[in-house]
């Protein structure tokens, strides 16, 4: 009876309790969602800032003046370099010409088939400057892909040869001459613009990151300014003769509690997506679920297999895509950087863009935060410093001798000295700051121009979502070696990911327990490096070392296709490594794929097995020349067979290219120029694809 009497009261209490918990859950979820939206805005480049408001004011004011030329600086960027260059050009044009010119920057990501014609075919005869990056096997950047496809389509169509006759343009390409398709995207943009009637202000200039991209850019920029002077009868304005002020963030000191609270909000926001696909600007912080060493104990090198949980991210991918990874600097490097700045690691601050800031000053990373977090997560400390960074250090150096040397290194006259002291020995920013101890920059200047943003590292995805939908994996060679300065250089991202490998030989542990709560910001970059839609088409996969990564995903995908009852065509895998007992990574998986007939043949080259004769994958290709020739010529696979190459661009990819020439000449009797023409047509048709770095 007592229980029956008290039941309604208990039920009522339980009801109130449930409602209270439910209300609390709603509040927490709402708070997190608002935090996500807030932090996402911080990660976006296109936030509204004080500078934006200033720009609007400048536009209104200049509308009443005599503007002689409208200039738009377009950039197609993958890592942010062309965007930085674009903003430097905008800044320099404003300083040089004042209100005689109206200039703005524009991301080619916003130009597509729907608005491109309106963008470029306007009546006021604009000058368009294009900073076009190329990555991979001659591909345009993700952000500029729609624009490039539209431009190429219009040029190849040929029906509108005067579509862009009102446009004057100049193209600067950002590429690397170690790649076979050097600056291919920039060359394509330049050629197509000219085909559509646009007039060149300058001939195309091809910047080379394998040499000195910064110097190439500075030289081209000088030519550009002189060409603008001549074409539009302009000269430096009074404003342009004023001293160029160093970009600088406003700095507000905050308490450690405020900084830590905001850092926690950033972490929570990146690990929870609210209807948003992760991108480079809004990545997803994923948990590592498995990490292991792929090399045997006989090897003095290291290679990491690492798996991330993306089941709740909204992230999708296909085999052949790339994984963008935001890594962290090693703690000893961070400590050295803080010592150079003469500040404690718990120094807490917020950065903001001041009124009237130059266009080259980009949005700061998420703050408030501690100096430890700023140096750990956001700052590139180990790359060689740019000349602009040296000029900034010179501006605050208190030692006359150090200031004079820094000024010379940053000048055009100091080109050789810069190469000898900075570029050739790969001297890092930390080493330079330690070499000039009197140059202690305030953090507003340091983060604005000296310590540039830590860029994401890209890895070929080594898995298929059809094998495990919530997991994405990467295969990472750990970079470690002495630089000419004697510094032990350890790759930022590869060394960071290696920390997740469990210590010791306990295979029951999937990751290092010290790293189990660490989440890694990720995003997927799509690629055209894809399996044929028809699984019966013959394929040849050539990938030594970590170049095998995308083919591991291909094999998992073929397994899944076969399990659904589809027939698989022939698949030939060529793999290379140094020694069978050291770095034959994923050996068990390859041999199982051969046993289950997921692949038709496995050819392995061990380059160090015989000290008298090194054998590489290209040598194995030539030995299999008859089969490859049949695939190339279509007697096997009805002219649809595909050849895939992944790995080193400078050595292996070029050697493979030559091996295919040799096969065509020896098996088909073709002359060298005929073989090259066949290879070119294979590449243009998508039958010869490369994912090289």
Image: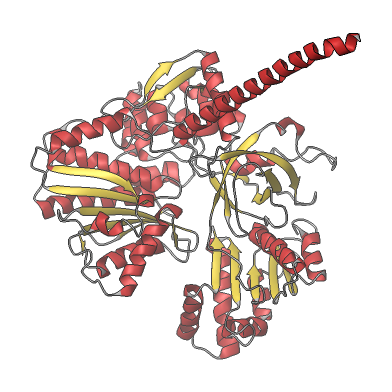
The picture places residue 536, in percent across and down from the top left corner, at: 67, 76
Question: Which residue is at a point 69% across and 73% down the rendered structure image?
Answer: 571
What colouring method underlies this structural image?
A: secondary structure
Tell me the quadrant of the picture where the N terminus can be found: top right
Tell me the quadrant of the picture where the C terminus can be found: bottom right
Which quadrant of the view contains residue 541? bottom right
Left or right of 342? Residue 235 is left
Query: In this rendering, is residue 177 above or below 157?
Result: above
- Front residue of this view, candidates 565 and 30: 30
- Front residue of this view, candidates 301 and 134: 134
**Residue 390 visible:** yes
Query: In this rendering, is residue 543 above or below 79?
Result: below
The picture places residue 269, in percent across and down from the top left corner, at: 56, 31
Question: Which residue is at a point 50% across and 59% down the rendered structure image?
Answer: 136
**Residue 334 visible:** no
Q: Residue furthest bottom?
A: 669
The picture places residue 42, in percent across and down from the top left corner, at: 45, 32
- Front residue of this view, candidates 229 and 62: 62
Left or right of 599? Residue 221 is left
Disc tally is: 0
Q: Residue furthest right?
A: 1
Question: Which residue is at a point 81% across and 60% down the rendered structure image?
Answer: 588
Query: In this rendering, is residue 366 above or below 600?
Result: above
The picture places residue 50, in percent across and down from the top left corner, at: 31, 27
Which quadrant of the view contains residue 172? bottom left
């Amino acid at each position: 009876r007592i229980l029956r009497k008290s039941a309604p009261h208990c039920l009522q209490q339980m009801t109130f309790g449930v409602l209270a918990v439910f209300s609390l859950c709603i509040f927490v979820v709402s708070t997190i969602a608002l935090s996500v939206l807030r932090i996402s805005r911080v990660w976006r480049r296109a936030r509204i800032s004080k500078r934006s408001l200033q720009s609007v004011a400048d536009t209104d004011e200049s509308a009443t003046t005599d503007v002689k030329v409208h200039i738009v600086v377009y950039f197609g960027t993958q890592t942010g370099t062309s965007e930085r260059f674009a903003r430097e050009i905008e800044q320099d044009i404003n300083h040089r010409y004042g209100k005689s010119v109206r200039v703005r920057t524009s991301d080619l990501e916003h130009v597509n088939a729907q608005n491109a014609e309106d963008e470029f075919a306007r009546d006021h005869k604009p000058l368009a400057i294009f900073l076009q990056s190329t990555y991979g096997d001659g591909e345009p950047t993700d952000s500029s892909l729609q624009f490039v496809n539209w431009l190429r389509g219009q040029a190849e169509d040929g029906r509108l040869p005067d579509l862009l006759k009102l446009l004057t343009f100049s193209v600067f390409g950002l590429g690397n001459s170690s790649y076979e398709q050097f600056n291919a995207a920039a060359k394509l943009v330049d050629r197509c613009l000219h085909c559509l009637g646009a007039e060149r202000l300058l001939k195309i200039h091809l910047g080379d990151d394998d040499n000195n991209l910064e110097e190439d850019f500075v030289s081209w920029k000088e030519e550009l300014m002189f060409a603008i002077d001549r074409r539009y009868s302009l000269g430096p304005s009074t404003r342009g003769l004023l001293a160029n002020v160093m970009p600088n963030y406003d700095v507000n000191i905050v308490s450690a509690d405020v900084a830590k609270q905001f850092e926690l909000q950033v972490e929570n926001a990146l690990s929870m997506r609210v209807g948003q696909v992760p991108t480079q600007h809004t990545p997803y912080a994923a948990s590592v679920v498995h990490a292991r060493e792929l090399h045997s104990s006989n090897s003095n090198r290291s290679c990491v297999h690492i798996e991330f949980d993306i089941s709740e991210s909204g992230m999708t991918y296909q085999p052949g895509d790339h994984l963008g990874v935001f890594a962290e600097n090693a703690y000893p490097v961070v400590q050295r950087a803080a010592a150079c700045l003469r500040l404690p690691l718990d120094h807490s601050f917020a950065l903001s863009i001041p009124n009237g800031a130059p266009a080259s000053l980009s949005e700061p990373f998420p703050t408030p935060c501690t100096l430890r977090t700023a140096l750990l997560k956001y700052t590139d400390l180990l790359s060689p410093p740019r000349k602009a960074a040296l000029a900034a250090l010179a501006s605050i150096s208190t030692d006359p001798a150090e200031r004079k040397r820094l000024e010379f290194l940053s000048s055009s006259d100091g080109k050789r000295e810069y190469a000898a002291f900075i570029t050739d020995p790969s001297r890092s920013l930390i080493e330079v700051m330690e070499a000039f101890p009197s140059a202690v920059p305030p953090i507003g200047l340091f983060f604005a121009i000296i310590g540039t943003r830590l860029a994401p590292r890209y890895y070929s995805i080594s898995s298929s979502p059809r094998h495990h939908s919530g997991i994405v994996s990467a295969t990472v060679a750990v970079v470690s070696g002495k630089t000419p300065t004697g510094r032990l250089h350890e790759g930022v991202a590869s060394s960071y990911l290696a920390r997740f490998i469990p210590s010791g030989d306990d295979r029951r542990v999937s990751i290092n327990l010290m790293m189990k709560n660490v989440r890694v910001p990720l995003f997927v970059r799509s690629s055209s490096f894809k399996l044929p839609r028809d699984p019966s088409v013959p394929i040849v996969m050539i990938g030594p070392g970590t170049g095998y990564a995308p083919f591991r995903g291909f094999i998992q995908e073929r397994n899944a296709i076969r399990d659904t009852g589809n027939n698989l065509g022939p698949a030939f895998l060529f793999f290379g490594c140094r020694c069978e007992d050291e770095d034959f990574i994923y050996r068990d998986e390859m041999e199982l794929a051969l046993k289950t007939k997921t692949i038709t043949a496995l050819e392995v080259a061990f380059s160090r097995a015989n000290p008298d004769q090194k054998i590489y994958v290209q040598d194995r290709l030539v030995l299999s020349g008859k089969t490859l020739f049949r695939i190339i010529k279509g007697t096997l696979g009805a002219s649809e067979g595909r050849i895939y190459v992944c790995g080193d661009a400078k050595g292996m990819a070029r050697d493979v290219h030559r091996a295919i020439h040799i096969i065509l000449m020896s098996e088909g009797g073709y002359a060298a120029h005929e073989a090259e023409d066949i290879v070119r047509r294979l590449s243009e048709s998508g039958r010869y694809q490369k994912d090289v770095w």
